[in-house]
């Protein structure tokens, strides 16, 4: 008799109707959005702090490069001020710090004689900002002294963007690569998160049946493997429901927040984005962005969606059956530790391999090999696919994955079948091995 | 076919450990069959094999003449010793779910549950969660769920644990009624007084082997020692006692009586019958008490287990 639909329905409904599940579902996006808003708000406050930096430039040549910005005001002291007096002055005014450029005969010795005084040690970005300004001015001076015409250098600078094109004639670009990386990374990471969250949920639900002692009542009516599969599928459906609600609620909230509180995206811009924005005004790069937009549609979207579904389901089944087996093997959650390590390790490995090697070379040896090993392939392959993986590789990888998950489900069912009826002792790996042979 | 369930030379190993060694039992239709044995003897393994939770390594089990098939779970109701319910699920929902797993339709399950809830006077529990009920109350639900699908074979493993005497009695009456309505019951327990009270047949499993089985009355006959409990009234206590001791094997006896002067357990000699003993006694003293000592299930259990 097939009770699978009945079990799936019960597992789904109990999960979805559970109070903490409901609270988690509706409160987490709120918390997430609130957290993001808080971080944005705090970093805004942090940036709002105005700094005054005094400059004592004995060379009288460099002070012109320090132009006030929104957050930093440069206070140029007269060049005949004594260093000690200047320090006292800055301290008395509670300025952020004092940049001291000692009078030196030539640029080479100026470079060695710049110092910064402050109460707190200044941040890296402040220091490198100051350094950049001085370096540029000194370089120009050096060039001029060497008899080189700066205008000429500027005019002769070449700026190249290599136009990328595949043999079949599709135009690609660097932005294309970022886009692919983002898509692949998101897919792989989503799977990773999903496995961890809902794998644990399955494990807890198996343990619950053991501790409440209902398990023997149930399996006198149902085959253990049906119960296990019902649990895995029911919990996944609940998980998908929760994820969907998160995505919908999250986007509504972000939309509402930006509209109501007026935290526009512009305010949240990081320095990198500012650079990007400036770059956008450059016609070449603007052109490239257009190319990138076009290349979004050039992504193997169909392939991506199909592969995502297959690898997501395959990878999830693979791991969740192991979680179910662990749940069956132990009596309570604290005993799960020793069995969790071998499950979590390949997952984490997959994410790291995915992030580090796929960025470096999506079709390199390491990424390719790991996209075939079943325990890492779902994550790594999902990250690789946007870069165009031959269909035969995807199919082969999935066949290996499918074969493995048939094996792990079988293996888990063996442990599950015996484990759910074992009470009161914490099994060792050796015992688990024996159970398989029962 | 007079036997509803036949287990034929069933063996089961768990790794090195032999949990059941060539065990055969036959449970007659309409009987209450006591499955007895010390802890760890293999009773639960046998019960799990009957429920198809575990598969035997060798031997086979017939239900109503047919080899066990997955469909047969609908004909079996099992109340395991390690039992429980989903704590956070509502009573009604849970009972419906478990009934559906046994193959009942939702409508039919609801109808029968209503009947049973009224019968055991727990109608207002439908929307309560199991965790709000006491242990005894939860056991009632568990009992209902076990019998709801009207199985031909009912297996109760320690059914009375967790019940107060009143509810235990209530459940006992329900079990007897189910038997009268045609169900066959396998009853596993360590409480020998309920074996005495309920069981027609018993089988005793000890260290993975079946060491005893048959009708309870036959077994008692087999175990009786032809001993009689005797209470006599006389003035010459010493003389009478000695006279009996000379002729018979005698043990001291304790039983409640008003004024017997001599209390003895007297074993018949091989050639004698009870009338011979009685006429001997009447010739010596006034007989107030004369009862054959029938071995209790408890005695049989202890004796068998010790001898093996």
Image (tube, rainbow, N blue to C red):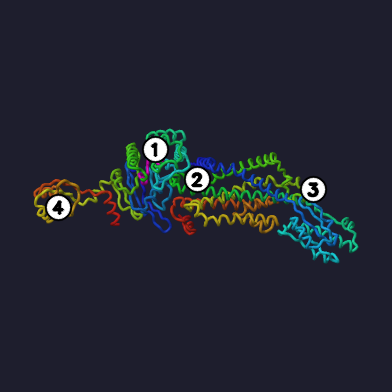
Q: CA distance from mark 4 to mark 1?
A: 52 Å
Read off the magenta span.
B141-160
- Quadrant where the C terminus of chain A sits is bottom left
Q: Say left or right for B236 vs B188.
A: left
Q: Nearer the viewer, mark 3 or mark 2?
A: 3
Near-viewer residue (B212 or B43): B43
Q: Are marks 2 and 1 on the same chain?
A: no
Which residue is located at x 68 percent, y 57 percent?
A: A357
Verify CB contact (< 8 Å) between mark 3 and mark 2: no
Residue B103 can be seen, yes or no: no
Residue A370 within the magenta-colored segment of the rendering: no
Label 1 close to label 3 by CB (< 8 Å): no
The residue carrying mark 4 is B271
Asked if B112 appears above or below A25 in the picture, the reply is above
Q: Residues within 10 Å of mark 3 (few under 14, many from 20)?
A: some
Whole-angstrom CA distance, mark 4 to mark 3, is 120 Å
Q: CA distance from mark 1 to mark 3?
A: 78 Å
Disc 2: which residue = A226
Marks 4 and 1 on same chain: yes
Q: In the rendered structure, the residue with mark 3 lies on which chain? A: A
According to the picture, the residue beneath numbered tag 1 turns out to be B150
Q: Chain of mark 4?
A: B
Q: Position of residue B30 (x, y in %)?
A: 32, 40
Identify the mark at residue A253; answer none if there is no mark: none
Cα distance between the residues tagged 2 and 4: 65 Å
Q: Chain of mark 1?
A: B
Residue B168 higher or lower than B301, as above or below: above
Q: Position of residue A293 (x, y in %)?
A: 75, 45
């Amino acid at each position: 008799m097939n009770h699978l639909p009945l079990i799936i329905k019960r597992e789904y409904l109990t999960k979805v109707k559970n109070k903490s599940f409901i609270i988690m579902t509706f409160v987490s996006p709120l918390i997430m959005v609130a957290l993001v808003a808080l971080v944005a708000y705090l970093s805004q406050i942090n940036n709002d702090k105005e700094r005054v930096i005094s400059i004592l430039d004995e060379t009288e040549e460099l002070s012109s490069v320090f132009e006030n910005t929104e957050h930093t005001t440069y206070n140029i002291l007269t060049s005949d001020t004594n260093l000690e007096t200047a320090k006292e002055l800055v301290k008395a005014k509670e300025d952020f710090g004092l940049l001291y450029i000692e009078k030196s005969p030539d640029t080479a010795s100026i470079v060695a004689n710049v110092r910064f005084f402050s109460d707190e040690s200044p941040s890296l970005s402040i220091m490198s900002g100051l350094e950049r300004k001085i370096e540029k001015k000194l370089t120009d001076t050096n060039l001029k002294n060497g008899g080189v015409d700066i205008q000429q250098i500027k005019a002769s600078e070449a700026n190249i963007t290599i136009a990328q094109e595949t043999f079949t004639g599709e135009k690609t670009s660097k932005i294309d690569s970022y886009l692919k990386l983002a898509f692949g990374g998101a897919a792989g990471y989503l799977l990773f998160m999903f496995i961890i969250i809902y794998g644990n949920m399955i494990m807890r639900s198996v343990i619950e049946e053991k501790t409440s002692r209902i398990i023997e009542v149930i399996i006198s009516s149902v085959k253990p493997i049906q119960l296990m599969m019902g649990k895995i599928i029911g919990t996944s459906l609940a998980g998908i429901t929760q994820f969907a609600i998160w995505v919908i609620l999250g986007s509504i909230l972000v939309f509402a927040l930006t509209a109501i509180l007026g935290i526009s995206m512009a305010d949240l811009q990081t320095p990198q984005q500012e650079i990007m924005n400036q770059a956008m005004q450059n016609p070449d790069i603007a052109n490239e962005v257009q190319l990138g937009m076009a290349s979004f549609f050039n992504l193997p979207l169909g392939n991506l969606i199909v592969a995502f579904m297959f690898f997501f389901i395959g990878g999830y089944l693979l791991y969740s059956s192991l979680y179910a087996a662990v749940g069956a093997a132990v009596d309570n959650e604290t005993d799960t530790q020793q069995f969790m390590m071998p499950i979590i390790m390949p997952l984490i490995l997959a994410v790291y391999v995915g992030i580090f090697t796929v960025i470096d070379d999506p079709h390199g040896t390491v990424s390719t090999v790991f996209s075939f090993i079943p325990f890492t392939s779902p994550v790594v392959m999902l990250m690789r696919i946007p870069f165009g993986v031959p269909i035969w590789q995807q199919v082969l990888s999935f066949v290996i994955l499918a074969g493995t998950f048939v094996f792990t489900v079988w293996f888990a069912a063996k442990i599950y079948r015996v484990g759910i009826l074992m009470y009161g002792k914490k099994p060792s790996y050796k015992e688990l091995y024996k159970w398989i042979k029962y | 076919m007079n036997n509803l369930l036949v287990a034929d030379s069933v063996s089961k190993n768990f790794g090195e450990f032999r949990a059941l060694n060539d065990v055969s039992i036959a449970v007659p239709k309409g009987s209450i069959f006591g499955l007895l044995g010390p802890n760890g003897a293999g009773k639960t393994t046998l019960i799990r094999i009957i429920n198809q939770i575990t598969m035997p390594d060798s031997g086979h089990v017939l239900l109503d003449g047919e080899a066990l098939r997955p469909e047969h779970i609908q004909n079996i109701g099992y109340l395991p010793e390690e039992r429980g319910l989903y704590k956070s699920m509502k009573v009604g929902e849970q009972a419906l779910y478990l009934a559906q797993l046994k193959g009942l339709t939702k409508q039919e399950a609801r109808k029968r549950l209503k009947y049973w809830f009224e019968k055991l006077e727990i109608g207002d529990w439908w929307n309560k969660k199991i965790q709000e009920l006491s242990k005894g109350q939860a056991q009632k639900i568990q009992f209902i769920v076990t019998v709801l699908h009207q199985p031909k074979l009912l297996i109760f493993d320690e059914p009375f644990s967790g019940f107060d005497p009143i509810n235990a009695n209530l459940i006992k009456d329900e079990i007897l009624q189910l038997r009268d309505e045609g169900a066959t019951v396998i009853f596993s327990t360590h409480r020998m007084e309920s074996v005495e009270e309920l069981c027609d047949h018993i089988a005793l499993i000890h260290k993975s082997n079946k060491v005893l089985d048959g009708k309870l009355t036959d077994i008692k006959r087999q175990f009786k020692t032809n001993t009689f409990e005797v209470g006599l009234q006389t003035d010459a206590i010493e003389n009478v006692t000695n006279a009996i001791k000379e002729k018979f094997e005698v043990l001291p006896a304790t039983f409640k009586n008003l004024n017997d002067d001599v209390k003895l357990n007297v074993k018949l000699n091989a050639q004698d019958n009870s009338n011979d003993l009685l006429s001997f006694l009447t010739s010596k003293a006034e007989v107030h008490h004369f009862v054959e000592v029938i071995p209790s299930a408890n005695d049989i259990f202890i004796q068998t287990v010790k001898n093996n």
